[in-house]
Amino acid sequence: MKSLLAFNLVVLALYGSATQARDTQSWIRINQLGYLQKSVKVAVFVSKDAKLLSQFELCDAQTNRVVFTSERVRNYGPYAAFRASARLDFSGFQKPGQYYLRAGTVQSPNFRIANDVYDGTADFALKYMRQQRSNYNPFLKDTCHRDDGFIVYHPDPAKDSTRIDASGGWHDASDYLQYLPTSANAVYQMLFAYQQNPGSFGDGHDKWGNPGANGIADVLDEAKWGLDWLLKMNPAKGELYNQIADDRDHAGMRLPTLDTVRYGPARLGFARPVYFVTGQPQGAFTYKNRTKGVASTAGKFASAFALGSRILQKYDPDYARKLVQKAVDAYAFGRQFPGATQTAPGRAPYFYEEDNDADDMELAAAELHRINGSNTLLQQAIAYARAEPTTPWMGADTARHYQWYPFVNMGHLVLAAGKTEASREARTFLRLGIEKVVKRGAGNPFLNGVPFIWCSNNLTVNLLTQMHQYRKLTSDRQFEQAEASLRDWLFGCNPWGTSMVVGLPKAGISPRDPHSAFTHLYNYPIDGGLVDGPVYGSIWKSLLGITLYSPDEFAEFQSNVAVYHDDYGDYSTNEPTMDGTACLSYILSALQQEGAGNQ
């Protein structure tokens, strides 16, 4: 259990020494990682009092001397738990160093301005990915779930309940379920991040995730770990599997290596069910999903295989050729059976409620087109893009759990990277989606237009990918302020003043009591994990089984607008997710590359 006293001491240390009594009803929220020298730099002032600001100061943290004074203040009034709020823009100051902001008697934590503030952060997130590995787990130096699994829902009764080797991959979150949709997306996201920013990734681990260079970037080792599992989940043409286990897994916290949950008769040992993709509703008990096809899953297989084949070609040509054929077959299967496959619930009504498949098939077609140049595939990709020009959660107030997944349409990004009419159309789609979210967030001081639904941080990270890529592809900087705000939100410029990535930055405020057996039972760090993030107060109050285990250190910042707890008992806001963490790969690697380019 964490120590509230220790937490408060950290906060006091971060605020540094003050020459006068500090205002305890007001705060200045900043990006604790810091700011690139030429980037947008905006902090947010929030207060329990109805205050209006007109100016602020930037002070050298070593000398306490004022080095910059600005009147670039925009007051926003009440927001969430606060009666007053304002944006403090110091973008014009670019000198590297360590600083803090001051507005009257309110002082921010210390932060850096430098072009290396994001260096190593993309590799840092991989710590959590390695810790999530199933079969061999390099963090625990032990194996788990090697008996996976036995087939369920196979259309041939003779094969139902028979064994299949589905070991490997990653556990989805702090439970030990494994899902194809999130895993395939994670593979693609890491491959894409490396493709765009290879210089941001190092080589400190081997293919098993153990320390030691092997001549391959760690992010590619991690992506291949996922690809190997995807191949097991697609052993033959037309034979696809969508998940391992179900919520019978939720039988108490334990390490994956100590998992003794049984799903079948004794003859199956600790093997877990592996769900065959049927295109029809599934569910082990009372609750059923609303599956209507296979294209969402087939498209995810195909896009991960296709991009994997291109990037891994120079390391293993035979493996790459195998991936190409798998991609072709999976895409054809999706064309044959359109519609979305949802994950299967167990005893509780919670599952990934994915409703869309056009984005998955667009990405698959676009990636295959890059391999063989087929005009037919290009036209199919364009048709899918037009079917879903903007991801439906963008601009919306709410959505069901993982209803519109992945949270960013990577197919638009692939199509947009060119000079054709299709590329221009795709860039328009990217802009329209961004505009919807920016418009929704324009009235609050954090410029955050992301709906606070379950896994809101995943939406934020994916929108950042879209915004950064759009800016890179078009040189259109009109959304730069909103992009910077979402970037900073993840690292402390939010109502709670906390980073949303465990252990990042090391000296800052970040989740210390996440919903994880690793931390809760054994005090093992789960560095790099992106937690779910804030939810609407109405959602938090409605979820089953949430109990706070410690006094809420963020109590004065909670509101109906958004709730976040750094507490093991809050699985809705403080549980890291594997796919959300993998999606960090692009924006962190891009920001590192951006910093290097400014030097």
Image: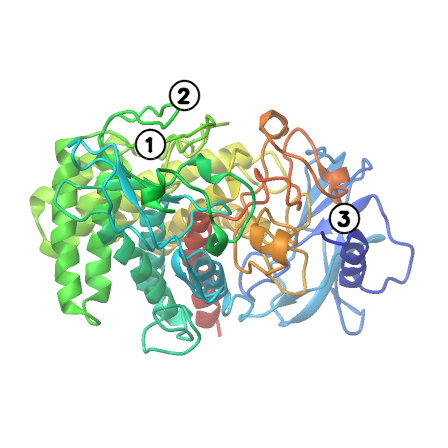
Q: Mark 2 Cα within 10 Å, few/some/many (few <14, many 20+)?
A: few
Mark 2 or mark 3: whose residue is earlier in sequence: 3
Q: Which residue is mark 2?
A: 286
Residue 501 showing in the rendered view: no
Q: In the figure, 217 relative to 541: above or below? A: below
Query: Under tag 3, what secondary structure?
Result: strand
Residue 264 showing in the rendered view: yes
- The dot on residue 271 is none
Going by the numbered disc 1, the residue's amino acid type is Gln
Q: Is residue 446 left or right of residue 152?
A: right
x and y, in percent, of residue 325 in the image? 11, 53
Going by the numbered disc 3, the residue's amino acid type is Trp
Query: Under tag 2, what secondary structure?
Result: loop
x and y, in percent, of residue 61 in the image? 75, 69
Q: Is residue 208 left or right of residue 382?
A: right
x and y, in percent, of residue 465 in the image? 41, 50
Residue shown at 65% from the left, 36% from the top: 563
Q: Foreground residue, 143 or 289?
A: 143
Q: Please tell me whether mark 3 or mark 1 is closer to you in this view.
A: 1
Question: Could you give the CA–CA distance between mark 2 and mark 3, rounded to whole angstroms?
Answer: 48 Å
What count of labels does the image hold?
3
Contact check, label 2 and label 3, Cβ < 8 Å: no
Question: Could you give the CA–CA distance between mark 3 and mark 1, rounded to whole angstroms?
Answer: 43 Å
Q: Please tell me whether mark 2 or mark 3 is closer to you in this view.
A: 2
Q: Which residue is mark 3?
A: 27
Q: Which residue is mark 1?
A: 342
Residue shown at 39% from the left, 40% from the top: 407
x and y, in percent, of residue 304 in the image? 25, 52
Query: Under tag 1, what secondary structure?
Result: loop
Q: Is residue 535 left or right of residue 580?
A: right
Going by the numbered disc 2, the residue's amino acid type is Thr
